[in-house]
Amino acid sequence: MNYTTGTGELQEWLVAEEGFRTSWLGKGETVFSLGNGYMGLRSVTEEHYANEQRNLFVAGTFNKFAQNEVTELPNAADVLWMEFILDGTRFDLTQGTILKYNRTLNLKHAELVREVTWQSPDGKVYDLVFRRFVSMADLHVIVQRVSITPRQESTLAMTSGINGQMTNSGVQHFLEGDKRLYDGRLMQQLQTTTESGIDFAFHSIHRFSLKGSFEPKSIIKMDRRQIFFDYSDIRIPAGETLTIEKYSTVFTSRDNDVMSETREELANLALNATRDIEARGYESLFNDHVKAWDDLVWSHAPITIESESMFDQLAVRFAQYHLAVMTPKHDNRMNVAAKGLSGEGYKGHTFWDTEIFILPYYTYTNPKIARSLLEYRYLSLPGAHQKAKENGYEGAMFPWESAWLDDGEVTPVWGAADIVTGEATKIWSGFIEQHITSDIAFAAWQYYHVTGDQDFMDRFGYELLIDTAKFWASRLEWNDENGQYEINQVVGPDEYKEHVDNNAFTNYTAHWNIQTAIQYVELLRREKPELYERLDEKLDLGAAEERFRHVLELIYLPQVREDGVLPQDDTYLQKEIIDLTKYKNQQNVGSMFYDYNLEQVNEIQVSKQADVMILMYLLEDLFTADVKRANWEYYEPKTLHDSSLSLSTHSVLASDLGDQELAYDLFRRASEIDLGPNMKTSDAGIHAASLGGIWQAVVNGFGGVRMTGGKLRISPMLPKAWNSLRFSINWKNETLDVHASRNQVIITRRTPTLEPLIIEVYGELREIKETFTSEVLSV
Ligand code: BGC
């Protein structure tokens, strides 16, 4: 990968690949993936190669193939597919000679361009340029443009169409469906998912030009789940350029912007839309697309970093790019998947990754989207109630992995091979990784305090906070001997410790959840009697409050030891300590499992990811700087960062502890999870949470932004490599522009009002009317 190809206006906007190897395909397919939150398209090449993974996902269109499998996001038809026969030889980069090759994702324009000069095994030379984008302006549209310039007079034959033979690792989620050709040019394929019954309508149409448009000789063909054209005898004079444009659309019966009662109506509407799209042409569609990207991301929430290394700016833009590609901002019935829409990994499911890692980006920069993602959780309360009931609890017990609103738990039960027993390892997260419930409550609370969105609280927020607290209050176990309530047999954030008692993160956040719910029940009774009454009917607030008050003081919260260390759970600190150097220096994550099985790892003081440390980030007021440092020193050396969620949290904490250089190193390492030299780590899809975490490392870490107890703090502190950092955040419906340099910070209110704004800056409360300038101080 090369990050330095952008110059002039495009500096720090281009991610490029300069070599072609079939063993590297997965990296480019993921890193270059395109999308608009409605759909995500893995960036495979037009022509096929072994090892490729062709994926098109439409957010929220889940299907369950069989009763004993979990719901997953189905891999939809491949519309990118094009095969070229140049002078009788198949265009194939593994054959002949590549004279020039580069593939570049322009983040600003969200356009992927591949430029190749290829010499066929027959010695003929061709210049080819492939461009494509998935429109941000028209959510259903994929456009490709291929230009072929032969150095000698040539003849092209081409196959191109819609291939519905796609599977998710062998699982076919679609019925055969119908295929049809319209207007002699427009291909249609209609398919329906096998269990959820979602109709998909795919359309593609081509446009050819060579000194003016023309229609080449063609035969339409159909096969099982395929419709395609065979074009032939396209003569291209030496040095002239043939351009082929392929306009494709994807619609489904789940789309909330499409009013269709039947599959026929959907098909008709999609057919007409495709005709319109083709009539508008590449340039016009592209211009609208670029503008939509600019409005949504680049002008809306720009971050500017002046760094010794241009990679830093690019890394943040890359994160913002993919966050926009993966987030279904158009529909509150769906959420962000752990691999976005860029791969089959984690089956399109949503985890705590959204609330703790991704949501802060939206809460602080685009509250409308944050609200939509939180509404998804509210709408999935029926599934959370079902899960609580099945487990003998009350309230809302959110699923660890979530898909359809009413699915409840969708975590698969069996995972990787156990090297000792030879059996599949059981995945316990779906049963006992329960902190997701307080994570959601926390994110709703954070959203409210940052945005001041009272309407959200009235309609969804109070209920979420109280219903989740009801779960915890029923989940607690009374320990008679110790006279306390405990939470036993859980998995905390550190998934290398299973069936532990009193995981600090779980207990503290559950306690926080109940404590916050008490405050809100009181507030509702006092200030919002009507809402109190409405929620009382649903949640029996009187009884809930009584229980909350009874348990609150009796919940066991692991206490900081004399040396400052907070026990991660009841037994962690008594476990064996081994030399982890080999695994700390690993090339690929999870290398410890080549030597140990999970049961053995469970008995060693080793952590997969931030656990105690993330508690000290989220509920930071509860812990002093000394305690944070002591825990860093104890746990970080035992943390393998085997989850991509770990490095960014550590970076923010290193910033908080005043070690900007360490924070910078961790920020770089987090950025390299997808952009780094390891060509294999992104095969299953992009690391969505890590990208949200990169934004946090910059804004919450170096930018020093934090909301604690409802109050805003901005205390930037830059690493040596940075000269300045500019970003904007939303705070209670207004925009604040922050410009931090090495020795000064300027905070400007974009639309000042008479009401002064109170912000804590380097430990002092400041009243800001329009703008405020401070020296950079360490606190
Ligand atoms: C991590 C979880 C995370 C999940 C999805 C796992 O490897 O341990 O914390 O939620 O991946 O990203």
Image (tube, grey):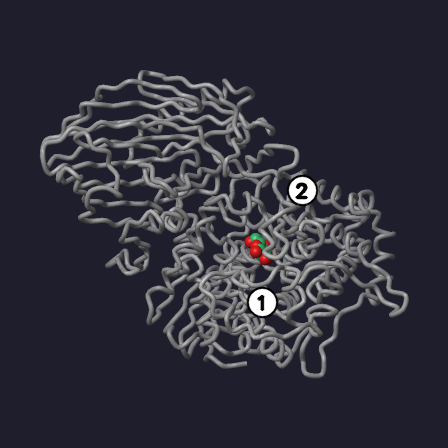
Q: Nearer the viewer, residue 529 or 475?
A: 475
How would you rate the neighbour count of disc 1 (Cα within 10 Å): few for under 14, some for 14-19, many for 20 or more?
Answer: some
In this rendering, the answer to whether 256 lies above or below 356 is: above
Task: Give the residue at mark 2.
Answer: 380
Q: Is mark 2 within 8 Å of ligand 1?
A: no
Does residue 451 appear in this view? no
Identity, as a three-letter code, of the amino acid under mark 2: Ser
Q: Is residue 593 left or right of residue 568?
A: left
Q: What secondary structure is marked by label 1?
A: strand
Q: Is residue 259 left or right of residue 462?
A: left
**For marks 1 and 2 on the same chain, the one whose residue lies earlier in the sequence:** 2
- Residue 194 rendering spot, x and y as whole percentages: 57, 27
Q: Quadrant of the N terminus?
A: bottom left
In this rendering, the answer to whether 600 lies above or below 93 is: below
Does residue 720 appear in this view? yes
Q: Nearer the viewer, residue 768 or 775?
A: 775
Q: Is mark 1 within 8 Å of ligand 1?
A: no
In this rendering, the answer to whether 40 lies above or below 664 is: above
Identity, as a three-letter code, of the amino acid under mark 1: Leu
Q: Quadrant of the C terminus?
A: bottom right
In this rendering, the answer to whether 329 lies above or below 78 is: below
Task: Give the residue at mark 1.
Answer: 712
Q: Which image quadrant shows ligand 1?
A: bottom right
